[in-house]
Amino acid sequence: MTQAYIEIKDLTFARGQRQIFDGINLEIPQGAITAVMGPSGCGKTTLLRHIGGQLQADSGSVSVAGVQMNGLSRSELFALRKQMGMLFQSGALLTDLNVFENVAFPVREHYQFDESMVRDIVLMKLEIVGLRGAAQLMPSELSGGMARRVALARAIVLDPALMMYDEPFTGLDPITLGNIVTLIRSLSKSLGITSILVSHDINESLSIADYLCVLAEGKVVAQGPVEVVKATASPWLKQFLTGSTEGPVDFHYPATSRANDFHLEAKS
Amino acid sequence: MRQTKNLELMVGVFVFLGLASLVLLAFNISNLGNSFSSPSVYSVKAHFDNVGGLRTRAKVTMSGVNVGRVVSVAYDQKISRALVTMEIQSDYPLTTDTQASIYTAGLLGEQYISLEPGAEDEVLRDGDSIYLSQSALVLEEIVGKVLVNLTTK
Amino acid sequence: MMRNLFERTGEKTLGFLQRLGRASIFLFHVLKGFPIVLTRPKLLLDSLYSVGVLSLLIIVFSALFVGMVISLLGYVTLVDFGAEQSLGVLVALSILRELAPVLTALLYSGRAGSALTAEIGLMKATEQLASIEMMAIDPIRRVITPRFVAGIIAVPLLTLMFMVVGIYSGYLIGHGWLGVDEGSFWAQMQSKVQWNYDILNGLLKGFIFGIAVNWIALFEGYDAVPTSEGVARATTRSVVYSALIVLALDFILTSIMFVEV
């Protein structure tokens, strides 16, 4: 395993009564794509929020690029975040700005570049996602896939060292899906960006991920290079990775006996 | 860019309208315009046995013309009478034997001070006192007097 | 049953205090970002357009009708006492002291306040605020502060316009229709209306209402449950709370400003 970019040690976190993380230990290697997977509601997105410093751990520690996230001052946190890009599930484009201004937004907020320089940077990033021609459109005029590509351009506009993708494959048509998969891979491989991919689309994720981490019920069930995890999978994990209905996870939510609910008392 | 210009213009017009309203309120609707045209006033005092319902900011008139305002109504412990301070516009000099009376505007209206100039040559200066005063008519007192007159006859 | 009632009252009170605390911290944070409107006036300008210019029409029309109604009702009452000459005073004082600040604040909360709540709530629900934060930009400073400052500038300005439009429309009805003498209408008004007492106090009311309404609207949006249902509820709450707070504040301010006990 190469050097770890993100280290998570004994992370616990509860929201109200619900224990979301119960002592998680995780390492995200530098310059590779790590897929974080798990059933719905197991806290994959919450994990990203901890890495981005939007949530504070109840106990344990999260460190990014050697910096402890706990107890950072606001300005230190913001300095760290300038090296992070995050692609939100909904795209999260600012609805009152057009595509160009959306991508230019972080640049304008952080730097006092002159207009021609901003233009060059923005059009370059839009070219990467193939939407240079859509620069003047408003977010409401974009399809879901286009919006996600614009959001991707915005996330990489400050050339981050770390990219976080929150469910990048959900709700896309097959062609757009292929585009996004290719984009994520090429961004990681050509620019050496450390990438974290949170998803439950198994096939797409496994096709580009170098490392795999599976979360379930607040714990890390498996982590390591994809092939290793696949080879040593438990029955539960095998069922999860193949998406089969047969296995230890029952289709039925735990209930009282059928006889009881359907009034099928044995007639004597 | 054109849109931006338009927006700036509209906001400019908006702020201008607001400030113009303020100016209009100051000079056309309130008394600020008047006090600007004759800003100088002088204050005189007067003692009354009874001020009735006289309040601060009540008007002070001479022959029905507004010449000033009551600034304060207080009780003077030393001579056990009410002390009324008023501001008179400098355009209206008052003789030293001016008489101050408290009247009521209409049957149910508010009370005001009416000044009647006398015959002296000397005029009151800032801070001087009017020594001729007539108190407010209090309805209960009049009714009481009438009743006494009726019963003693 | 009794125990249940007390428990629920306590729970509600605690919840309220908690919200009040969060709202205070929020306001502090908003005010701390104030320099941004000086360094980037464009942000303030954009917000002034959406909260101020867009509320102008409803304020002007309402003022027009309110002035006319006050003039009509006032005349009907005053003419019985032969005091219709005082119509100008009555119209001016009721509008300046009471109606302009209160109605402007209520109308503003319906027009601009609800829009602010919905806008901020939707930005939260669609993760726009979270994404701004992930770009290492403070969303309160960048998004909320300019709107708040624009709001507390816009409400007093709108109040002033309400005052002028209301009084002139009252004059139109009083003089043009009811035939009150023009001279005594204005002269009595000018001698009775005091700049620093009536107008500045009315304006001060408008300013205080402006702070309350914008604070409530922006906080409700920022604190909304990030779902479409949550945003809808927050918008309703924003208007209801604004109305209640404005009327309660109005009672307190009126008793301090205009009543000599």
Image (cartoon, rainbow, N blue to C red):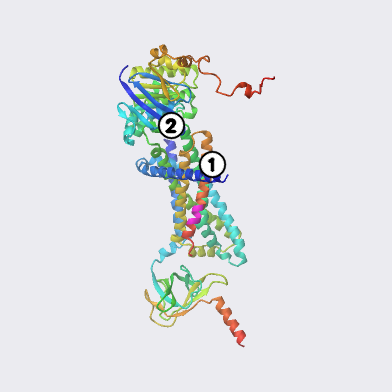
> Which mark is drawn over residue A14?
2
Q: Locate the N terminus of chain A by quadrant.
A: top left
Q: Is residue C251 magenta?
A: yes
Question: Where does the image place residue C45, in percent across and percent down from the top left?
Answer: 41, 42
Residue under pointer 1: C236
Q: Amino acid at mark 2?
A: Ala
Say which element carries label 2.
Answer: strand
Q: Is residue A145 magenta?
A: no
- Residue A75 visible? The answer is yes
Question: Where does the image place residue B70, in percent across and percent down from the top left?
Answer: 45, 70
Q: Amino acid at mark 1?
A: Thr
Q: Nearer the viewer, residue C71 or C258?
A: C258
Above or below, A211 against C205 in this view is above
How many circles with numbers are drawn on the protein?
Answer: 2
Above or below, C116 against A119 in this view is below
- Give the main secondary structure of the magenta stretch: helix
Question: Where does the image place residue A207, in percent across and percent down from the top left?
Answer: 42, 14
Crowd around label 2: few <14 · some 14–19 · many ≥20 (10 Å): few
Question: Where does the image place residue A237, in percent across and percent down from the top left?
Answer: 45, 16
Q: Locate the C terminus of chain A by quadrant.
A: top right
- Residue C110 visible? The answer is no
Q: Is residue A48 left or right of residue B149?
A: left
Crowd around label 1: few <14 · some 14–19 · many ≥20 (10 Å): some
Bounds of the magenta segment: C248-252
